[in-house]
Structures are given as C-alpha cells and as structure tokens.
Amino acid sequence: MDKKSFYLSLIVIALTLVMTLFIKFYRPATAGDVNFDTFPLQIGDWQGTLEELDPQVLELLNPQAIISATYVNSEGVSIHLLFDFFSSEATFGGPHSPRNCLPGAGWVITETIANDIQTKNSVIPAGRFQLKLNNSKQVMDFWYITHYGETANDYVFKLYELLSALTFKPRDIAFVRFVGQDDPKSLKALEEFQTLILEEIYGHLPFEK
C-alpha cells in the first residue's frame, strides 16, 4: 500500500469512528415536554384507577412520563392501559419488548397476529398477543411510536431508531399497551375503549398524527 492510500484509509477510519461516536452519544432535543398529569381517568362510561409501578421497574425503564391504569366500564369489563414516553435527551432506559418481558413473568404467548387499529385519520399497525397463564387467557395490543412512524415489530422499531440517529431527528419513543380478557364481550369492549382513548393518548404525545 502506498503512502497516499495508507493516509486515505486512516482518514476514512477516523471519520467512521467520529461519526459512530457522534451518532451514539448525540442527543437531539426532545420534540416537546411531556407529562400525563391531565390524562383523563374517566372517559365515556369507563372509570380508571391509577396503579403504582415497581420503583425498580421505573428506574430500569427511565420514562419521562408513564401511565398505568385499569379502566372498568358499566358492564364490569376491565381493560389495563399502560403507555409511556421516553425523551430523546435521556442517556439510558427505554421501552422493553413484551416479547421478552412476558415469558419472564410466566405468560405464554400462544399466538401473535397483526391487529391494525383504525383511527379517525390513519391506521395503527398494532400487534396482538394471545396470552395464557394457568387458566387465565388474555390479549395484549401494543405498538411503539417514533418520529418515523408506528410499529409493533421490534426490528422495524430498531430501524426507526437508527434512521432517527442518522438524520439527527429527536429519538423520542412512546410505547402503548392494552390488556384485556380473551372473550367476545371483552374484545368488543376493548375496541370501543381504544376508539375513545386513542385521541387522548396521542394528544399527550409530541408526535405528528
């Protein structure tokens, strides 16, 4: 290798290292301050009750804002809602994939299906897990939200994170999860509850919808 090629290789390696470190450690400003203090616990005939989260879980996830609440309607059907927001400026933490967390808690994912959720302006490409623990059967609808879009696919989510880093966009992330019983009455109620609450969820997040 001649000197010119050698020095050119060094320059390419140095630039690659600088860009890698910049992408890894650069934290663009978040797209907006987020808090859920005004998030409604009553919507339609659904009444919600906030639930405390394990401090160790909160420390691990490090969300800027989080809601964990169980909503019950007039017929006694209950839906658990959890959604959280992770600021682009955070240096650690982030959402954990339910594909990893659920088995660790003893739940068996018996089926995974795509579950597009229709909103007023778009379709959310949510995922749905059918879950089983002993004699209990539940469903979980979930998805990630980024400035590049929504997805329930962990690999697409990582791609969106990478695109945000490469284009210096805010790396804000939200994760939304609904859990209900796996029976016809509860599934119908889940759809109705999502229709009511999704506008409130997105209204509290700094993502264009």
Image: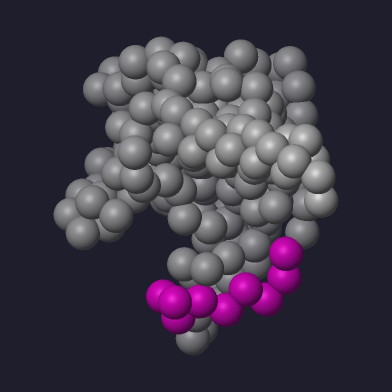
Quarter assignment of residue 25:
top left
Q: How far across and how far down the image is residue 145, in percent?
A: 58, 33
Q: Is residue 54 left or right of residue 152?
A: left
Residue nearest the viewer, comparing 34 with 18 = 18
Q: Which residues are magenta?
A: 103-112
Residue at the (51%, 47%) spot, across then down: 177
Q: Is residue 4 magenta?
A: no
The spot of residue 69 in percent (x, y) is 33, 43
Q: In front here: 100 or 194?
A: 100
Question: Which residue in the rendered view is the most extreme toward the front?
Answer: 2
Total labels drawn: 0
Q: Nearer the viewer, residue 114 or 60?
A: 60
Across and down, in percent, residue 78 comes to 43, 51
The answer to whether 207 is drawn above or below residue 160 in the figure is above
Residue 189 shows in this picture: no
Residue 176 visible within the image: yes
Name the one closer to the observer, 91 or 84: 91
Residue at 42% in and 46% down: 94
The residue lying at 34 percent from left, 45 percent from top is: 92
Q: Quadrant of residue 54?
A: bottom left
